[in-house]
Amino acid sequence: MKILLTALVPCLFIFPPAAAAGDEILYLAASETEALLAKEGQKVVVHGDTSGSKKSASGTNFVNFKDAVFFLVTFKSDLGQFPDGEPSDAFEGKRIAVEGAIAIYQGKPQIKLTDPKQVTILAPDADFPPTAMKDAPVEAAKPTEENPVTVTPPAPEAPKRKPPVDPSEYFKKKE
């Protein structure tokens, strides 16, 4: 069993699980308060221009967005993850996109910022959010010698579950 786990665990990092067909990234502007409130607990990418970021007396960092009630919060315990400076200073006045789960605090949407990898600094003229590729025509794959097309058989159906067993049939009281 240990050998099997030792062999399979590295495969999870080499071959990460594919996203389900319905898993699409949801992009929302920081000013879309109602949409952000409706996505509580869900992972989204929020984008916008930052302005008025600050740090509290306890060391908590707040990154605010122009014309929005949405904000990023980084607690003092997470600041060690930011070697390039505290988020309130590092992202002030920049156009950013941040990925994370929406939480509601005092009726305002927020994302808890715990890792600098959650944030992408965008160029002022960058086209964001990215346009979907749904409308692009998809060409059928044509087999060639270098790239033969293989047909994958459908996955077998999961076995049907058996009904529960009454344990009293197997564990009868001795008299």
Image (tube, rainbow, N blue to C red):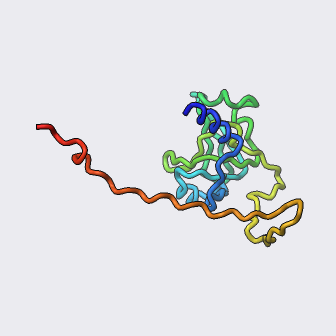
Is 146 displayed left or right of 128 in the figure?
Answer: right
Vertical comparison of 8 with 165: above or below: above
Residue at 25%, 44% in the rendered image = 170
Residue at 56%, 52% in the rendered image = 42
Is 70 displayed left or right of 85 in the figure?
Answer: left
Residue at 71%, 52% in the rendered image = 48
Residue 38 image point, x, y percent: 53, 58
Residue at 76%, 31% in the rendered image = 84
Please state, as top left, top right, bottom left or bottom right, where the C terminus lies in the image.
Answer: top left
Residue 157 image point, x, y percent: 53, 61
Vertical comparison of 157 with 121: above or below: below
**Residue that sits furthest to the right in the current view:** 145
Please state, as top left, top right, bottom left or bottom right, where the N terminus lies in the image.
Answer: top right
Residue 101 or residue 8, whichever sits in front: 8
Residue 137 or residue 33, whichever sits in front: 137
Residue 103 image point, x, y percent: 53, 47
So how many labels did they put on this image? Answer: 0
Can residue 36 be spotted in the picture?
Answer: yes
Residue 6 or residue 119, whichever sits in front: 6
**Residue that sits furthest to the left in the current view:** 175
Can residue 28 be spotted in the picture?
Answer: no
Residue 21 image point, x, y percent: 63, 61
Is 175 displayed left or right of 120 in the figure?
Answer: left
Residue 8 or residue 19, whichever sits in front: 8
Image quadrant assignment for residue 92 = top right
